[in-house]
Amino acid sequence: MKHLFIFLIMLLPNVIIAQNAETTYAEKLGYPKGKKVLIIHVDDVGMSYESNQGAIRAIKEGVANSLSVMMPCGWVPGFVHYLKENKDLDAGLHLTLTSEWKDYRWGPLAGKPKVKGLVDSEGAMWSNVADVVKNASPDEVETEIRAQLERARSMGFEPTHLDSHMGTLFATPEFLERYLKVGMEEKIPVMFPGGHNTAIQAGEKMIAERFEMTQKVGKQLWAAGLPVLDDLENTSYGWKGPANGDNSEKALQKYKTEKYINAIKSLKPGLTMVIMHCTIHTEVFPKISDSMVTREGDFLAMIDPELRKYIEKEGIILTTWREAMQRRQEVK
């Protein structure tokens, strides 16, 4: 997710953007004024057995309350079978246009003949966002988005929302346009922060022109009958572990929990999606990815009673994309 909002990252000298004083989208959805309303969201479900179990347990035993699924990946059936028995789960599509790991890879669901620009020399999706931008057309991107949605629906999985793996759909205005188009046409909420964007501005130093663009898109999504995020907290993948190198469960849980509490403390009122990647510990997952420590830390933080205590003490409201959409449908 480090590539999220590539085209929004500041490329010009610093421009200080005044905070939007308008009513938050959370308030427009009927949540109390001045409250922090969080969707605590787990990415990369379906990628592996460990990813499935990490997400399921983070929600069942912890404070996480939403997730999204990588439809081209091998462990999607294992999760969807679970989902059919737990239909209240807030589960969306983690629209996937890259295949970033070396020895464990996947290809496009639309098939290579239809989306040649999305496929590398191994027959898998490109390993990085830059190569997708270089080789794929917007038409191919939209074709693959719709193929992933079609697979979900054919399996009996109606997603509560759409978001973007590695932020690829935010990499160019043309890709973003297709992402938003599908969401609006299909009446599926899309992850896009169109509000005050305080956390994003702090982390990525957005230029004024880009900030204004997010406001316009937010209004467009709202007018299309979809809920809109006020902000996005997306820094957790960079929290690699305690500085002293102690990655024991106890130390890792304490480290990550403190990071999440501090991040939530810094958020402004409104509807914010907090992104993470939860994975249980196994001997196999490190063969897939070198991100085991940060992913296990996310899982441990989600099930930490201290994080739940903080959220409850601060009166923070937890919600889901499903509830946000239901509220949007009630707004005239």
Image: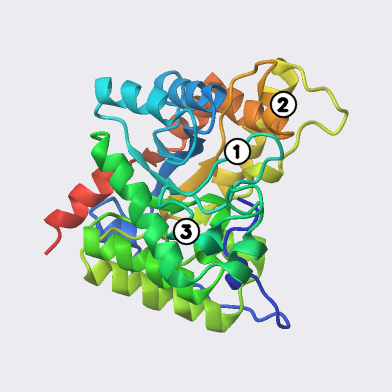
Q: Residues within 10 Å of mark 2 (few under 14, many from 20)?
A: few
Say what secondary structure mark 1 lies in. Answer: helix
> Which residue, given by chain and number where applicable, does mark 3 sit on?
231
- Tell me where residue 159 appears, x and y as whole percent: 29, 43
* Tag in front: 2 or 3: 2
> Which residue, given by chain and number where applicable, does mark 1 sit on?
260
Q: Amino acid at mark 2?
A: Lys
Asked if 55 appears above or below 206 in the picture, the reply is above
> Which residue, given by chain and number where applicable, does mark 2 sit on?
287
Could you tell me how far apart the alpha carbons at marks 2 and 3 are, in whole angstroms?
Answer: 34 Å
> Do the residues bearing badges 2 and 3 touch, measured as CB atoms within 8 Å?
no
Residue at 26% from the left image edge and 25% from the top image edge: 84
> Do the residues bearing badges 1 and 3 touch, measured as CB atoms within 8 Å?
no
Q: Quadrant of the C terminus?
A: bottom left
Asked if 163 appears above or below 45 in the picture, the reply is below
Closer to the N terminus: mark 2 or mark 3? 3
- Tell me where residue 329 appears, x and y as whole percent: 15, 55
Say what secondary structure mark 3 lies in. Answer: strand
The residue nearer to you, when weighing 33 against 75, is 75
Q: Residue furthest front?
A: 113
Q: Residues within 10 Å of mark 3 (few under 14, many from 20)?
A: many
Q: Residue furthest right?
A: 244
Scheme of colours in the image: rainbow
Residue 221 visible here:
yes
Asked if 137 appears above or below 91 in the picture, the reply is below
Residue 197 left/right relative to 14: left
Residue at 52% from the left image edge and 65% from the top image edge: 170
Could you tell me how far apart the alpha carbons at marks 1 and 2 are, in whole angstroms?
Answer: 27 Å
Q: Quadrant for residue 13, please give it.
A: bottom right
Say what secondary structure mark 2 lies in. Answer: helix
Q: Amino acid at mark 1?
A: Tyr
